[in-house]
Amino acid sequence: MAQFGQLNPTDEEVEGIVARVMSNQDEVKRLSEQVMSDKMLNLFKEKINVKAKKSKLSRVY
């Protein structure tokens, strides 16, 4: 909310915004997909062990 100039919105203002967003099914779907993507990314980061290798630029060319 700070990015929109409201540093300390009231509970009623936040509830009104949430109600408007949740009434838009496209927005609900987009937010749901974003949450799932974030959760999956965090799970992959937690479970996958990636070892970084240093490569020499001369090998690439």
Image (tube, rainbow, N blue to C red):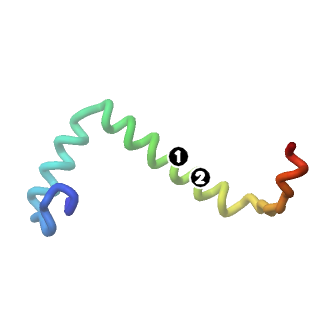
Query: Which amino acid, mark 2?
Result: Leu
Q: Which residue is mark 1?
A: 37
Front in this rendered view, residue 34 or 50: 50
Find the residue positioned furthest to the right. Answer: 59
Quadrant for the C terminus in the image? top right
Residue at (12% x, 64% y) in the render: 9
Q: How far is disc 2 from disc 1 in space, using C-alphas?
A: 6 Å
Quadrant of res 30? top left
Residue at (18% x, 45% y) in the render: 19
Front in this rendered view, residue 5 or 30: 5
Looking at the rendered structure, the secondary structure element under dot 2 is helix
Q: Which residue is mark 2?
A: 41
Residue at (83% x, 53% y) in the render: 57
Front in this rendered view, residue 21 or 45: 45
Q: Is residue 59 left or right of residue 10?
A: right
Residue at (58% x, 58% y) in the render: 42
Q: Residues within 10 Å of mark 2 (few under 14, many from 20)?
A: few
Query: Which amino acid, mark 1?
Result: Ser
Q: Are marks 2 and 1 in contact (CB under 8 Å)?
A: yes
Where residue 28 sits: x, y (%)? 33, 38
How many numbered badges does the structure rendering display? Answer: 2
Where residue 50 sits: x, y (%)? 77, 60
